[in-house]
Amino acid sequence: MNTTPNILKLSELSAIVAGIFRMHFSGERYWVTAEIVGLKISRGHCYLQLVEKDEMGSTPKAEFRGIIWAGTYDRIHPRFVKTTGTPLREQMQVLLQVEVQYHERFGMSLVVQDIDPAFTLGQLEMERRQTIERLRKEGLLERNKSLDLPVSLQRIAVISAEDSKGYEDFVTRLNTNVYGYTFHLTLYTSLLQGDLAAGDILTKLSQIKNDFPIKHFDAVAIVRGWRCFQSGMF
């Protein structure tokens, strides 16, 4: 009886797996929903980390690497931005058309061929409505309107990232205002994306509140992406 095990080189096993993938997935495209939890642009290519989370929204049920090659990215991303008003980013729900590919060295990945911006737009609108309803129930929706603000908000604490395009645009617009006002900004650097962003922003708000007796601010602005999405006054 021959008890010699069937020994394969790693490259041979990888070639077998690649053959199986080509047999079952070659040329096939699938529409899949996923959340982007990682995104990086390099040499025009867009590298994604895609997950589906459980019902509690905490534990991943499935996770894949994704890539949008530069030529495809240049074709589909401008259309996505035009429709949704925002670029692809982390913590965004997307509907992607993908091909499943396996590379002998780099393993399995999803190559994105198209993206449906209408799906993401619907998700963003749903999230916006849920946020508004939550603020209304907690009595926070009209809270800023109840505050007496100075005629000119010139001393502003800003929570943002120093290299954020939104922060850069915010500063430019203030410095080039048509009324010639001078603004004094104090930047509190914070994470803006990812699971740790909310906690970091809350920490910076607490820091601003603690600094307030010494550093008097007229308002605090949280600047993320291309928009200032919240402002307030202490």
Image (cartoon, rainbow, N blue to C red):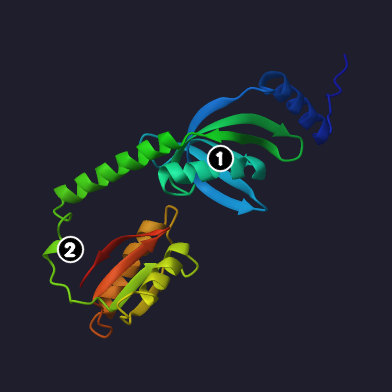
* Residue 110 sits in quarter: top right
Q: Where residue 113 sits: x, y (%)?
A: 60, 33
The image position of residue 144, as x and y in percent, is 17, 63
Q: Of the residues tagged 2 and 1, which is closer to the observer?
A: 1
Which quadrant does the C terminus fall into?
bottom left
Q: Where is residue 58 in the image (x, y as percent from the top left)?
A: 40, 42
Residue farthest to the front, as pictured: 178
According to the picture, the residue beneath numbered tag 1 turns out to be 76
The residue furthest top is 1
Quarter of the figure that contains the N terminus: top right
Nearest to N terminus: mark 2 or mark 1: 1
Residue at position x 45%, y 69% in the image: 168
- Callout 2 crowding tier (Cα within 10 Å): few <14, some 14–19, many ≥20: few
For mark 2, give the secondary structure.
Answer: helix
Q: Nearer the viewer, residue 127 or 37?
A: 127
Q: Which mark is residue 234?
A: none
Residue in view at x 68 percent, y 19 percent: 24
Q: Is residue 6 above or below residue 160?
A: above
Residue on which disc 2 sits: 144
Q: Classify 197 as above or below 79.
A: below
The picture places residue 212, in percent across and down from the top left corner, at 25, 79
Crowd band around label 1 with a 10 angstrom C-alpha radius: few (<14), some (14–19), many (20+): some
Q: In this view, does 95 lie to the left or right of 45?
A: left
The amino acid type found where label 2 is placed reads Asn
Vertical side of 96 occupied by 45: above or below: below
Query: Looking at this view, is 139 or 82 the one in front?
Result: 82
